[in-house]
Image (tube, coloured by chain):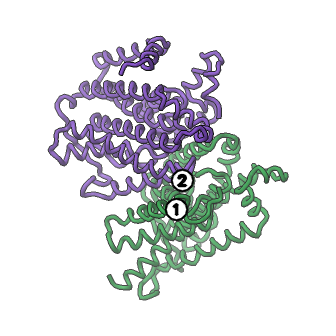
Amino acid sequence: MWGKEERKLFTEVIRSKWFGFSVGLFLLLLILPFFIPRFYVYILALIFVTSLLAMSLNLVVGHGGLFQFHHGVFYGVGAYTVALMLKKTSLPMWTGFIAGPILAAIIGFIIGWFCVRLTRLYFGMLQISLGSLIWAIVFRWYSFTGGDDGIPGIPMPPLLSSSKGSYYFILIILILCLIAMYMILKSPFGNTLQAIRDNPQRCEAVGINVKRYQLIAIVIATFFAGVAGVLFVVLERSVFTELLFWVLSLEIFIMCLLGGWFTFAGPMLGAGIIVALRTFVGIFTEYWTLILGIMLILLIFFLPEGVMGYLEKIFKPRTKEAAKGGSE
Amino acid sequence: MDFSAFSSQFLVGLSRAMILFVVCAGLSFVLGVLRVPNIAHGSLYMIGAFATFSLTKLIPGSAGFWIALIVAPLLVALVSLIAERALFCHLYQREHLMLLLFTFAISLILGDLVKIVWGAEYRSVSAPALLKGSISILGASLPRYNLFLLIIGPLVAMALWLFTNKTKIGKISRAAAVDREMVGVLGINVSWVFASAFVIGCYLAGVGGALVAPIASITLGMGHSLIIEAFLIVTIGGLGNMWGALVGSLIFGLTQSLGVLFWPQFAIVFPYVAVVIVLLLRPKGLLKSVW
């Protein structure tokens, strides 16, 4: 279990300069709810949920090089599954929490199985088609999913119904998922995935089953998206069809772009910036999407590698490692 | 189910398919030449519909609608020309994902601009006097406006065919769709080919918006829901293939309107199911893609 590879990875993590920063940030987030008002606790928890969603998308987009255009569907499936199970059945709630991500991963497998047969934009268009099918069903099935009214007032166990309780639950799940994602990316599987991103032809030539690797990556990413969906329900205690609409999917894309595709923590930063901006800009103006659009254009023109990518480029001396992300 | 209900739904579906075709032909044209799924296409369609509303308010009588049918698409084309020349043309060297996200940014901005200019209320346009009322065909009564759409659709298809096959710019853009580097090598300014293709595609979105104005309520969300349908249609038709857009529109429009007869609640699901079936059988679309 604790082999040579893992030990090497572990020491590498401990020694990296980000490690101290992350642990400090984690400790800060642990004590923060005792000092700030409830509203900010809620915003922080929302940032955690969105971060997990953006990180899961970046597994396939940034590290896998796939055009996963409709990631929001899996988020929505996870959220709707747990919402429906808590609302309509009397099964213990933990089964719902487990079923959400698993069903998201199953849907991810089915949609991914069709999509990996195609490449690039065709992949993305097919995924939008299949995702929209699921959206249309949820949108129309009034008797089961509540249609465009969504499902309000989902019962939560007392442990998770306080704002601090849900905050800590979401934070802990987020940390566990981040560790899992980091291990996946540093594993041989993750390395192969990134190799496929950089040069699919060569990978195919040396005997890697490219499509199988991509499909596995999609299933993993959709699983984590499902986890994010469950956390969303824990936080908001309601679901609505916007979760599955394509506009949300592209907003997550913007978060990954803003933070930086080719960095590990970039999408979290992007999600934090977008959620915080939306909250505080929303106080002053109702034209938030206008600002988001202008921001996106500026980003595309001046900062195509994202905030994290930019910072890394400044602080890292130019080595082979640093040049790796920028190629292609 | 009697025959008149069937034929009425069939004709309504066919006329809805004509509007979809006009919009999707534009999307497909841009896809073919620029290789970018233009997400802002839906917003431009929405602007076309809102502009038609304003023009019919401005010019009383039925002349208003006919003038709007000419002017509104030109306005949309102007908006797209500005967006293309000011911003989009600097990005052609970038990877496609960036171009796609750029069109998403434009759609976000246009969505809010429409909200600023026209507000968030529902709007409606009445059809001109000539096209009011209904006539009976095949034992079903069909609104005259839908009949008008059934005539307009083939006209647009014919005009597009003439444009792409008989005019020089059409031929160049078809060539650019297949091999843009070769077109550049021949000394043609590819940047302007792209610009004109983009503007023509967006013009068609405006035409679609103007055509749909009298039979739909004009709202802020109409662009967002249309663009997904349009994406599906061009995907099942074969990306960048204009006749594919026609076939896709017919499949989409007819399955939706005939689905109403069988299962009204889930009528919007039928086209998606049809799309999935088509993609299972032919993952790259029914007709040949230009890619």
Image position, residue B264 (x, y; %): 32, 69
- Along the horizontal axis of the image, is B125 left or right of A30? right
Residue B126 against residue A42 in the figure, above or below: below
Q: Chain of mark 1?
A: B
**What's the residue at 55%, 56% (across, down)?**
B47
Q: Which chain is purple?
A: A
Counting other residues with Cα less than 10 Å from the Cα at mark 1, is it few (<14), some (14-19), or many (20 or more)?
some
**What's the residue at 35%, 18% (across, down)?**
A29
Residue B280 against residue A189 in the figure, above or below: below
Instruction: Please say whether residue B243 is visible from this viewpoint.
Output: yes
**Looking at the picture, which amino acid does disc 2 mark?**
Ser
Dot 1: what SS? loop
**What's the residue at 46%, 62% (across, down)?**
B275
Counting other residues with Cα less than 10 Å from the Cα at mark 2, is it few (<14), some (14-19), or many (20 or more)?
many
Q: Which chain is green?
A: B
Which numbered mark, 2 or 1, is in the foreground of this view? 1
**What's the residue at 20%, 36% (across, down)?**
A156
Residue B1: name its quadrant. bottom left
Q: Nearer the viewer, residue B75 or B283?
A: B283
**Looking at the picture, which amino acid does disc 1 mark?**
Arg
Dot 2: what SS? helix
Image disc number at residue B230: none
Image position, residue B224 (x, y; %): 48, 53
Which residue matches tag 2? Answer: B43
Between the residue at mark 2 and the residue at mark 1, the CA separation in whole angstroms equals: 30 Å
Which residue matches tag 1? Answer: B282
